[in-house]
Image (tube, rainbow, N blue to C red):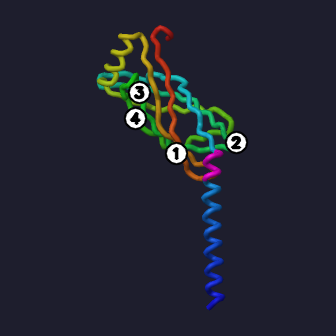
Amino acid sequence: MRQARRSVRVLGVLAGVLVLTVVGCSRLARSAFQNPIVELHDVQIKGLGIAGGSLDVILDVYNPNDYRIDASRVTYTVFADSLKIATGEVSKLVTLDNKQTSRLTLPVTFTMRELTQAAGILLQRGSVDYAVEGDFTLATPFGSLTRPYRSKGRYDTLAR
């Protein structure tokens, strides 16, 4: 009976040590992980029609980590000034090589109403501030992590 109690205690202590080790390693890994750095590279209008249009938002994504990470999902919201133009997600696998910049194209569709509002801002000012924000779902050596990103720029008719 004593032997059984002693074995149960030893197993309990070992299980506790194992849990603390896993939690500690996970926290250490998350603190060692650096978020990808996202910069807006370009916005290209692909098409315009009566109902709306489409454009490509092109991002440069830098992976500052010493290891490759794979993004299994990227969500995005595109703003023109404070006006939300579009939201969506890309569910194809995107590989971010260590210490490298990768280019990611986000296909965006918008309605004529959204286009008219953004065009009104552009005509009034001659430029429009835009932003792209969302989340990366990353598969890292330490498990799956979801990290936010935000990038912004200005579309200027005089600079084009």
| Mark with earlier residue (1, 4) | 4
Identify the element where label 1 is drawn: strand
**Dot 3 crowding, Cα within 10 Å, few <14, some 14–19, many 20+:** some
Picture coordinates of residue 28, whole percent (x, y): 64, 51
**Dot 1 crowding, Cα within 10 Å, few <14, some 14–19, many 20+:** few
Image quadrant holding the N terminus, namely bottom right
| Mark with earlier residue (3, 4) | 3
**Which segment is the magenta one?**
27-32
Q: CA distance from mark 1 to mark 4?
A: 17 Å
User: Which of 14 and 92 lies nearest the eye of the viewer?
Assistant: 14
Looking at the image, is 66 positioned above or below residue 45?
Answer: below
Identify the element where label 4 is drawn: strand
Q: CA distance from mark 2 to mark 3?
A: 32 Å
Looking at the image, is 111 positioned above or below residue 125?
Answer: below
Identify the element where label 2 is drawn: loop
CB under 8 Å between discs 4 and 2: no
- Location of mark 3 (residue): 79
| Mark with earlier residue (4, 2) | 2
Identify the element where label 3 is drawn: strand
Picture coordinates of residue 96, whole percent (x, y): 62, 39
